[in-house]
Image (tube, helix red, strand yellow):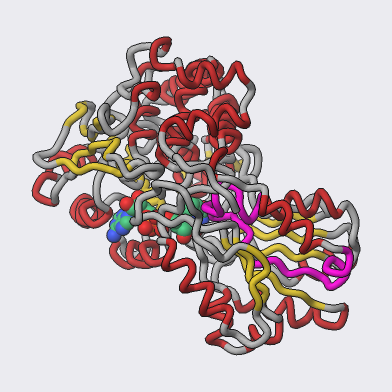
Amino acid sequence: MLLSPLLSSSLLQQACRGLASPAICDVAFNSARRLSNWATVDPDKWDGANPAHAQNLVAGRWTGAARSKTIPDPMNGEAFVSYPDTQASEIDHFVASLSACPKSGLHNPFKNPERYVMYGAVCAKVAEEMRKPEVAGFFAKLIQRTSPKSWSQAMTELVVTRRFFENFSGDQVRFTARGFSVPGDHPGQSSHGHRWPYGPVALITPFNFPLEIPALQLMGALFMGNKPLTHVDHRVSIVIEQLLRLLHHCGMPRTDADLIHGSGAVVNELLLRAQPRSTLFTGSQRVAEKLAVDMRGKVFLEDAGYDWKLLGPDVQDIDYVAWQADQDAYACSGQKCSAQSLLLMHSNWRKAGLLDKLKARAATRQLRDLTIGPVLSWTTGAMLEHMDKLLRLPGAQLLWGGQPLEGHSIPACYGAIQPTAVFVPLAAMRDPEAFKLVTTEVFGPFQVVTEYDDDQLRAVLDVLERMSHHLTAAVVSNDLPFLQEVLAHTVNGTTYAGIRARTTGAPQNHWFGPAGDPRGAGIGTPEAIRLVWSCHREVIHDFGPCSATSQLKQS
Ligand SMILES: NC(=O)c1ccc[n+]([C@@H]2O[C@H](COP(=O)([O-])OP(=O)(O)OC[C@H]3O[C@@H](n4cnc5c(N)ncnc54)[C@H](O)[C@@H]3O)[C@@H](O)[C@H]2O)c1
């Protein structure tokens, strides 16, 4: 694959101009001048010579730390963000701020109910701001600079976030906190189920969706009356900081949420000391399992994504299916927790030429427009080493890719490889070690492809049964008995079914989260918010009258 020789901020401008409408691009690069004074980053002048300076937020005050660290620009290695490198010795304020929130929360159905309405108004105002092209462009640019992805992917993240704010405008926050009542046994008695806050809570999210994931979870926590301590991966946390500044501008009380930049280890120490009553963690399986132990089970988890797509026997709309498969595997350089990691195709699809179509699509991805780009949590060497191990399995072969990207200045701490696919025969996956290797999540532009015949559906279902994580899945078929069979024997929390099925997408209008684990969280919808950010409290009203007969009946 031939790549453009220079990659820096001008490359990002090309990336934007390559895909967005001209009007949106112009505002994206002239946004800072027209933003209100809440923003502290100017995307027009943001580079190593003019780095952004991130700040922590604690008890309503923006603060720093004794030391600071810098983040390399993923496109050229220039130190383009400095952030407070908060040490364990500096977390007292955070502990005190979180501890100041009572278990009954900042609001609940009996306390400060006007705050439900207030958050509906804040959402309406934020949505209004995000509809302004200069604000949309500002956030899309921040997303693209910190977690490089094509302009259309960055803009989609902004749009999903904006629609979420639209969804929860007006009375929708209080409707989300809706309870129920059941008539009692005698006059004056009725039982009422309420959605109750946990009070002090924590929220930890990764780098790949710097705006959408923390924004949706942060707001869910706030809607239900909690006080969240927020931590987003330090490589991208400048984005949520800017959103918090916009939220304050739109009327959110400054003391409602805290933000800590910096290392996960310090946040771990902070959680141990502050003991939030619930923690939502989105990120790797390794950290998820550690926090589950450290927090004695008081966690909701959205962890590793090893997601599969099963192409049924009925070949149709092959160009659409190829386009969707390419998007699912390689958009955002494969750094979506919902990315297609394993493609299981019925042999009819191979015969119809699907692999050639997929290979041709992968070859059109370019660094120039960020349809392929830096990988933030795997180095080039680690991804290629993993590929080599897979290629040593019996019958394995490289389908496409498998080379480092060339002609760029992406720093060596990050990865950069071509969109890659390795074929592994279904039979090879019977071996437990091979299965472990095949189902290791590579958080980059990497997928495993396999093939099955009519008489091998059981073997396919066995592979799916043996997987440990069940986030997204796609069953690409309009063959109803086939769909029925597969859906009946699988468990993924977000499963797409039908010829248009995908593994990625995660818009604000449907549940997104794993299934098959009682700790599994969800994001975005009223049901997800109720599950993750509130618990059930039953209040039984029993006001009387207390007649002599009712005393007799009880004895
Ligand atoms: N299931 C989902 O919805 C979802 C969504 C996005 C990403 N992911 C997963 O995230 C992973 C990619 O992100 P990563 O590898 O950078 O994740 P990671 O687990 O290393 O980091 C995630 C977050 O945890 C923090 N952290 C790290 N160690 C910590 C500790 N000991 N205590 C508290 N916080 C700590 C980090 O600072 C970061 O904010 C992939 O596995 C991907 O599938 C899952």
Q: Magenta residues, as a range?
A: 327-352
The number of discs equals: 0
Q: Check the image and report above or below for 387 versus 317.
A: below
- In this view of the protein, which residue sits in the foreground, 125 or 210? 210
Q: Is residue 181 magenta?
A: no
Left or right of residue 96, residue 500 in this image: right
The percent coordinates of residue 299 (x first, y second) are 39, 57
Residue 345 belongs to magenta span: yes
Horizontal arrangement in the rendering, residue 51 relative to residue 330 (left or right):
left
Q: Percent from the top left, x then y, of residue 132?
A: 53, 15
**x%, y% of residue 416?**
47, 55
Q: Tell me, yes or no, if residue 279 can be seen here.
A: yes
Dividing the image into four equal quarters, which quarter contains ligand 1?
Answer: bottom left
Which of the 4 quarters of the picture holds residue 318? bottom right
Front residue of this view, candidates 184 and 317:
317
Q: Residue 463: which quarter of the image? A: bottom right
Q: Residue at x 41, y 53 (%)?
A: 376
Task: Determine the residue positioned at 32% across, 67% down.
Answer: 293
**Percent x, y of residue 439:** 56, 73
- Residue for point 41% across, 51% down: 280
When asked about the image quadrant of residue 114, the answer is: top left
| Residue found 23% across the figure and 32% down from its top | 55
Residue 542 visible in the displayed image: no
Q: Nearer the viewer, residue 20 or 5?
A: 5
